[in-house]
Amino acid sequence: MPSRTVPRLILATVLCGASLAASAHDLHEREPNAGQPIGPSTGYAFALPDPGSYRLPAIRPAAGGSVLDERGRGHDLADLLQGRITVLAFMYTRCGDLCPTATLQLSLLQDLVAKDQRLAQRMHLVSMSFDPDHDTPEVLAEYAATWRSSEPGAPEWLFLTAPDRSALAPVLAAYGQAVSAKPDPGAAGGPLYHIFRAFLIDASGQIRNIYSLDFLDPELVLTDTKTLILNQEQDQHAASPAP
């Protein structure tokens, strides 16, 4: 069992339930079948394709920008998106609807990937806050402890924020991440209006897929991640000279 405490798992379940009730997305109630993964795709009318049986063409380069990690160390986001496959999601810790559901799905994805050590070494997760006034590195460190697995074999999961709003603005613009303040800062669901987007980015920094909350299913993202690796291996084999 992943090294998350029982109270934290309960918290995740409660937050997920609240999110589904308050979400702007119309997530209809579904009756999950035994053995199916928990996630938005439970109830899909089709089976997921086999990994490597399709291609994910590059959409555009993933943008960089000035960010801070949980220890307050500065980075260029683009540098953190190189060398491994990345699942990048935008969020903020005061969110009471979309973000807890999305973060729960990422935690389930982390658990799935942890079962495959080869894959765990070739990909990681990144959660990027768009609320730098509140989400300091210290706040993100505490938030990360709630969600992130401490299993030795789990893939890395980074939690990032921006130094300030001026540094954040070009990052949000580059990814098309809309965020605006609600008239009432104490409104249910948190003080910010926002859409949810997560990005699958290959090891060379190219965006290969974009997920809404409805499609952020751990099994689907896992299949896409394996597909990127298999496509790369297929391309390398095709480019190799014949013996």
Image (spheres, rainbow, N blue to C red):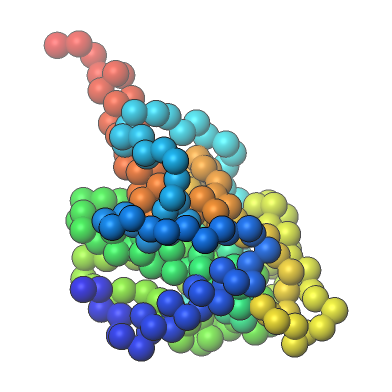
Q: Quadrant of the C terminus?
A: top left
Q: Position of residue 6 (x, y in %)?
A: 31, 85
Determine whether, in the image, residue 224 is placed left or right of residue 66: left
Q: Position of residue 57 (x, y in %)?
A: 50, 31
Residue for point 59% across, 39% down:
60
Determine whether, in the image, residue 147 is placed left or right of residue 34: right
Q: Quadrant of the N terminus?
A: bottom left
Residue lying at the far front of the rendered structure: 31
Residue for point 41% across, 38% down:
46
- In the image, residue 51 sits, relative to residue 35, either above or below, namely above
* Quadrant of the rendered image containing residue 227: top left
Determine whether, in the image, residue 119 is placed left or right of residue 200: left
Residue 195 appears in the picture as rendered: yes
Count the marks: how many?
0
Q: Position of residue 130 (x, y in %)?
A: 65, 70
Instruction: Give 111 or 49, whichever is nearer the viewer.
Output: 49
